[in-house]
């Protein structure tokens, strides 16, 4: 005999679809100190000014649509300026750069206030949390693992890494080292237990709806049973609005917890143009901001939504 689902169950929030960067953790907290430490080492090895080297790394980040590009040293600038062997480049530039990046991720990555509290209560309430990120998959897996959330999320949906081709690859030793590191980070997926780990095409970057549609389909929930959380009204809010889904705006991720000297890293050190505005996200943005169901001052502000339409016994158990 099939048990009918009650109207109460149909209205319960069963899935949080959460952005990662700026929503669960701040990239600035670990990435800015890492870049501030790494670029001087690269510049010294290249015998080039810090602001030029930083700008050229930033150029690759923009071209690859990823601050955490797996291949930061491709392109004509590094090919032209490096005077040593390809192997020496790896020893003096590539390895030290990534050693700092990876070490400071493990050292400084931390979840925003309310994240762990929300994960705990969501588990008690039977609400699953899936990550939908526009960061490259290897970077998303590394950050969630560093936070210890790899066994807490029910799904990870992230964009495929950019792999340079052709003339951009001037140093095979560097390319091989970066490729091996990339594959090593992608194998972190094995530590996510039963979570769905899905690499999305780059064309699925939010506010494209196909990634979110894939998440909803995989978890077999309706838009009414899910809520999208994110720090970008245009991207996270835009994709939710396109599907008629509730959007929780993680306002705190925009600027509440970010030291100004860290935000300056992106706007100055990694600025390859130095006199123009950088557009890190190369997607069409809506002319009007989408509606916001709830403004979140911490991640835990979503908890009242999760408790709605649940029996008092379930809420008491979670509390």
Image: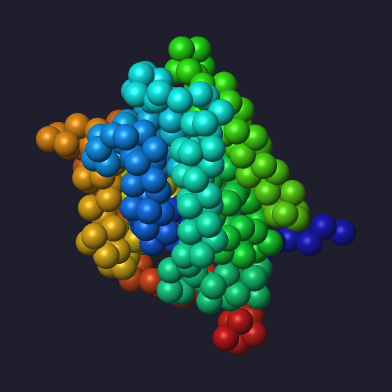
Q: Is residue 226 visible?
A: no
Q: Please identify the residue farthest to the right as the structure is shown.
A: 1
Q: In this view, does 130 lie to the left or right of 44?
A: right
Q: Can you tell which quarter of the image residue 29 is in?
A: bottom left
> Which residue shows up at 74% across the image and 49% down it?
190
Q: Can residue 51 be seen in this view?
A: yes
Q: In which quarter of the image is the C terminus?
A: bottom right
> Which residue shows up at 57% across the image and 21% down it?
172
Tell which of 11 and 254 is nearer to you. Answer: 254
Q: Is residue 133 positioned above or below 64 on the image?
A: below
Q: Quadrant of the N terminus?
A: bottom right
Q: Please identify the residue farthest to the top as the structure is shown.
A: 167
Q: Please identify the residue farthest to the left as the structure is shown.
A: 275
> Which residue shows up at 63% across the image and 51% down it?
155
Tell which of 281 and 47 is nearer to you. Answer: 47
Picture mark count: 0
Q: In this view, does 159 lie to the left or right of 252?
A: right
Residue 275 image offset from top left, x and y in percent:
12, 35
Residue 305 image offset from top left, x and y in percent:
47, 70
Residue 166 image offset from top left, x and y in percent:
50, 12
Q: In this view, does 134 lie to the left or right of 241?
A: right
Tell which of 20 and 188 is nearer to you. Answer: 188
Q: Is residue 203 positioned above or below 8 on the image?
A: above
Residue 255 image offset from top left, x and y in percent:
26, 62
> Which residue shows up at 34% across the image and 24% down it?
81
């Amino acid at each position: 005999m099939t048990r009918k689902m009650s109207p109460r169950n149909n209205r319960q929030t069963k899935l949080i679809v959460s952005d990662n960067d700026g929503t669960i953790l701040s990239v600035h907290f670990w990435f800015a100190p890492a870049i501030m430490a790494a670029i001087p080492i690269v510049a010294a090895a290249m015998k080039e000014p810090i602001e030029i080297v930083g700008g050229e790394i930033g150029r690759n980040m923009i071209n690859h649509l990823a601050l955490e590009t797996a291949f930061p040293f491709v392109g004509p600038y590094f090919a032209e300026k490096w005077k040593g062997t390809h192997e020496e480049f790896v020893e003096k530039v590539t390895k030290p750069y990534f050693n700092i990046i990876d070490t400071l991720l493990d050292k400084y990555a931390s979840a925003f206030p309310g994240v762990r509290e929300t994960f705990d209560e969501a588990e008690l309430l039977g609400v699953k949390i899936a990550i939908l990120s526009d960061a490259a998959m290897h970077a998303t897996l590394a950050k969630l693992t560093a936070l210890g959330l790899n066994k807490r999320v029910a799904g990870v949906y992230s964009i495929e890494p950019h792999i340079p081709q052709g003339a951009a690859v001037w140093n095979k030793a560097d390319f091989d080292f970066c490729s091996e590191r990339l594959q090593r980070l992608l194998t972190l997926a094995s530590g996510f237990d039963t979570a769905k780990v899905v690499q999305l095409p780059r064309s699925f970057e939010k506010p494209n709806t196909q990634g979110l549609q894939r998440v909803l389909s995989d978890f077999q929930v309706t838009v009414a049973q899910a809520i999208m959380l994110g720090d970008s009204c245009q991207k996270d809010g835009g994709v939710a609005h396109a599907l008629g889904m509730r959007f929780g705006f993680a306002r705190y991720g925009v600027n509440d917890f970010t030291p100004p000297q860290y935000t300056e890293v992106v706007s100055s050190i990694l600025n390859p143009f130095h006199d123009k505005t950088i557009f890190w996200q190369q997607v069409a943005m809506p002319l009007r901001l989408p509606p916001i169901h709830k403004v979140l001052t911490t991640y835990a502000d979503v908890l009242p939504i999760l408790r709605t339409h649940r029996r008092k016994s379930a809420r008491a158990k979670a509390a």
